[in-house]
Image (spheres, rainbow, N blue to C red):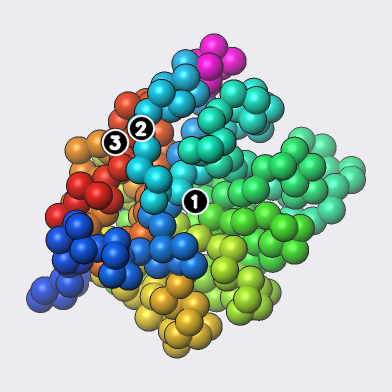
Amino acid sequence: MMMKCSNTQQLRRPAAVTRRPAATSRRSAKTYAGATGTFIVGGNWKCNGTHDSVEVLVNGLNAGTIDANVEIVCAPPFVFLNQVLDTLDKSKFSIAAQNCWIGDGGAYTGEVCANMLTDLSIPWVILGHSERRSLCGETNDIVGTKVAYALSKGLKVIACVGESLEERESGTTMKVVEEQLAAIANVVDKTGWKDVVVAYEPVWAIGTGKVATPDQAQEVHAGIRAWFANSVGADVASSVRIQYGGSVNAGNCAELAGMEDIDGFLVGGASLKAEDFVTICNSAKFSS
Ligand SMILES: O=C[C@H](O)COP(=O)(O)O
């Protein structure tokens, strides 16, 4: 299937960007979106690891002190799901698959279907990651269908959206993101969004070290929330949690976490280092 890639530039920034109030008041007031109002951080381990390195990572995560108000979802490669299920402290961490098949199981060599994940009691799946879109030819419609199917089987979904550098530079960031969201909204009814977290991941920021500025991220997150208000419903707009992903690390997470419409992160590279990932998970309470 297909390929395509990217890098950076900025949307026109608003003159001023609304920031959350001080850390202590953030949680007691609305703070983060979602039914539980919790910050949600995903660790996408991508295609990394060995049995031994996963053991080290899990031990490091289990030893970490995590704020009880933060929801954390770790997404190992399929082959390590059982190992992680057996060893990760599930009182602190939940588990996701990084992908699943578009429908029922059957003669689909190399695929893993939603029912297999629920059979293992895996609650989450990441769908529509830009690497799946660009490297495996997953179109907006395919991603939408996958999201709807996964939800119908009882999975919760982290649905990824985001623009390439070329799209950003041509001023089409929101158009691209809105089309990606619309493809999901076309096949997911309004109530289904309660089990969806949107991960905004500008492709040019993924694995490049070129993190979006807090203002850049906030602008798109606010645009996504506005799109939900106009296209799905005000209740969904205020409750859907929107993660930022793309070169998040222990050093930049606090400022990003302080932005009004950032409700969590989807972390790639830094999720492979337990200490850094724990810092990111706890970033909400330290942000200003
Ligand atoms: O799913 C995670 C994202 O692709 C971000 O990856 P990164 O943190 O390595 O840039």
Could you tell me which residue is drawn at 65 percent across and 25 percent down? 86
Q: Amino acid at mark 2?
A: Thr
The part of the image, by quadrant, that contains residue 142 is bottom right
| Magenta highlight: main SS | helix
Q: Which residue is mark 2?
A: 65
Image check: 10 left or right of 202? Answer: left
The numbered mark, 1 or 3, whose residue comes first in the sequence reads 1
Do callouts 1 and 2 mark residues in contact (Cβ within 8 Å)?
Answer: no
The part of the image, by quadrant, that contains residue 11 is bottom left
Residue 207 spot, x, y in % from top left = 36, 38
Q: Which residue is mark 1?
A: 130
Q: Which residue is mark 3?
A: 279
The residue at the far top in this view is 52
Could you tell me which residue is drawn at 89 percent across and 43 percent down? 107
Residue 173 spot, x, y in % from top left = 35, 68
Image check: 112 left or right of 265? Answer: right
Q: Residues within 10 Å of mark 1 (few under 14, many from 20)?
A: many
Q: Is residue 146 above or below residue 121?
A: below
Find numbered disc 3 in the image and state the secondary structure of the residue it sits on. Answer: helix
Q: Which region of the structure is painted magenta?
A: 49-55
